[in-house]
Amino acid sequence: MKNYFLLLFLCPILNLNAQNWTKNYNPGTKDAQGQFMAGNEIMQIVAHKGKLYAGNSYWQEKDTAQNERSCEIVRLDGPNSNWQVDKAFTTANLRIGAMKSFTFTTNYLGQTIQPDTLLITVPNDNTGNLAYYVRNDVNGSWTGTSLANLSSDINCRAIGFHKDATNQICYVFAGLQDYGIFSGRYNPASPGKIQWKQTPEFVTPPNERVMGFTVCNNVFYAATSDGGIGHIYKRTDGTTPIWTLVKTTSGGAQAEDMRGLSAVPNPNGTGEVLWYSWNNKASRVHPNNNYAETIEYVYTDSLSKQLNTNVKYVLAAYNDNIPVFNSNQLNEDIRLIGFELKYNNLNDPRPNWQGWATDGQYFERHQKGSAIWYVRKYILNNAPVVKDSLIATRTLCVSPFLVDSNKVLYAGGMDCNSIPMTRQAWIYKGDFKNNGTTQVLGISDNTAWQVFPNPFANHIWVENSTNEDVYYLVNAKGQFVFSGKNIQEQDFSGLSTGFYWLRIANEVNATTFKLIKL
């Protein structure tokens, strides 16, 4: 056995508490200025000019006596600060449907300007008077301007940004359900510095929601869906842009949407391919191969194995592109994918609320060359002791605060799933700065392995284990229990109940897992 066994002996305890998640937001409290903060869902967390901004939702709020105002944007000024209300909207606005920070480098004529970064949001409006808002970072105010005056409740769940390759104009896009994609350009003389076109640049099919925009190989794309049918459209740049349908997919649930549209490195060559989440699966679409689709991960199947129970449904990537996680290893691409899952059995022994898992989980998608693997992470593992209820990780954001050195995450979520409730929005802070063995934020030694189920009763399985892998199992007292090679499947039924440390290593990677024996 090779000399990396020394690492196996020295390292099991180094990853203790490597992922230190703590509660960071308390709905139903007042900020320092006495303004009420609540919400049932945290829809987005966005870093903008060194601060954090979170948009919440009052959808399905049942305590209307104490929650007369509707959605807010709350702000965090520093790692030791408290959240405070930055913008409170009216009772016409239930959700912060979309919020992003974009940097404009050209104006509405395509002329180069001093870069100007704007924080933009489009809350829903149940009266049909949909408006966009832009933050004035000098005085802290928000400028709201009508985007469309429509006949019914309307929402915007995606905004995007693209520099037209033909006319060099920077455009911001807003996707409106039922009405299409609107575009705006930078004009300092316009309200909020954005000059919006009052008619849609592209009219989407009836009832379809635009849930994602992305730039792939310098081409702009949008994803729309409704009633189990999803579409991807490509924009051909120019003075009169053309939108072309390039991909149709089916099989999704009636209320599901094509989510997380983004660009990832092409695992089979140069350039990029499209990635999206749909119908319990993560898929790639290859623009240079007639938009052929490759299913790269089936959430329900994998999670059922990992959790040792029947997972009925997974909604992943929500309403945002996958956040990029920068790696110290430049040849590895890492993304974060928040999700919610529902167990098939409402009385499942795993911690849940009406079948919805309460652990606040997310995936890390790793890509190294043609190798792609997914690692499931807990924000809060409620087994065996329930600590809090974190349903649906909707949004993840790397801390913008310099002292955090890109080693702190903020995660937020909750999905009401049409169930009335009150003040259930959550934000947790994940501090990875004290993890001495981690090379990549949130990654346990850049591992390619996954262990499931955990907790376990008898057997465990390790995905991606080969004959080159060696392992040690260490109990809570630091005593070696087992050692061997290629731990694809192992019977640990003879172990006492409690927790153990499983250390796996080869000449490239090494990692430690904390296991719980039931």
Image (cartoon, rainbow, N blue to C red):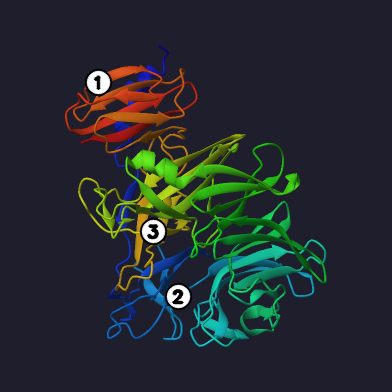
Along the polypeptide, which appears first: circle 3 or circle 2? 2
- Helix, strand or loop under label 2: loop
Counting from the top left corner in percent of width and height, residue 63 is at: 28, 80
Name the residue: 34% across, 67% down.
425
Which amino acid type is marked by label 3? Ala
Contact? badges 2 and 1 (CB < 8 Å)? no
| Residue at which label 3 appears | 392
Q: Specify the quadrant of the image occupied by residue 471.
A: top left
| Residue at which label 2 appears | 95
Question: Quick check: 127 above or below 403?
Answer: below
Q: Quadrant of the N terminus?
A: top left
- Helix, strand or loop under label 1: strand
Counting from the top left corner in percent of width and height, residue 498 is at: 19, 34
| Residue at which label 1 appears | 480
Name the residue: 35% across, 22% down.
8
Which amino acid type is marked by label 1? Phe
Q: Quadrant of the C terminus?
A: top left
Along the polypeptide, which appears first: circle 2 or circle 1? 2
Left or right? Give the position of 476 relative to 98.
left
Along the polypeptide, which appears first: circle 1 or circle 3? 3
Name the residue: 43% across, 42% down.
301
